[in-house]
Amino acid sequence: MPHMQYPRLQIVTIEELLAGKKLEYPWLGVATFKMAERKTKRRPGQRRIFDTEEGTGPGAA
């Protein structure tokens, strides 16, 4: 099916949709993208809000 032509404008009535008519368009499959490297917003030495002085709070690493 490569290089098939599909109409740019397709007018379908509600009646046709309810009857099961589908639009004609190319099936692109599952597009996958390369995942970006996750960056952290915290700077070195920056503490979380609930960290205690000793670093034993809920956000301590």
Image (cartoon, rainbow, N blue to C red):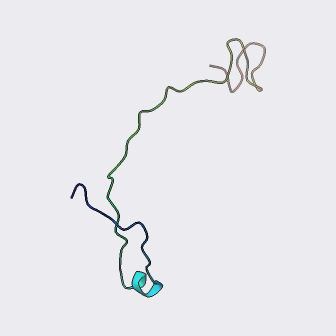
Residues 4 and 20: in front is: 4
Quadrant of the image containing the N terminus: bottom left
Q: In this picture, is 45 found above or below 8?
A: above
Residues 19 and 23: in front is: 23
Residue at image coords 68%, 21%? 42
Residue at image coords 32%, 52%? 29
Total residue callouts:
0
Residue at image coords 69%, 27%? 58
Q: Residue 41: image x %, image y %?
A: 66, 24
Q: Quadrant of residue 9?
A: bottom left
Q: Residue 15: image x %, image y %?
A: 43, 88
State the residue lying farthest toward the left.
1
Quadrant of the image containing the C terminus: top right
Left or right placement of residue 36 versus residue 27 in this view = right
Residues 16 and 54: in front is: 16
Q: Quadrant of residue 32?
A: top left
Q: Quadrant of residue 54?
A: top right
Q: In this picture, is 59 found above or below 23?
A: above
Left or right placement of residue 54 versus residue 27 in this view = right
Q: Residue 48: image x %, image y %?
A: 73, 23
State the residue lying farthest toward the bottom.
15
Residue at image coords 73%, 19%? 47
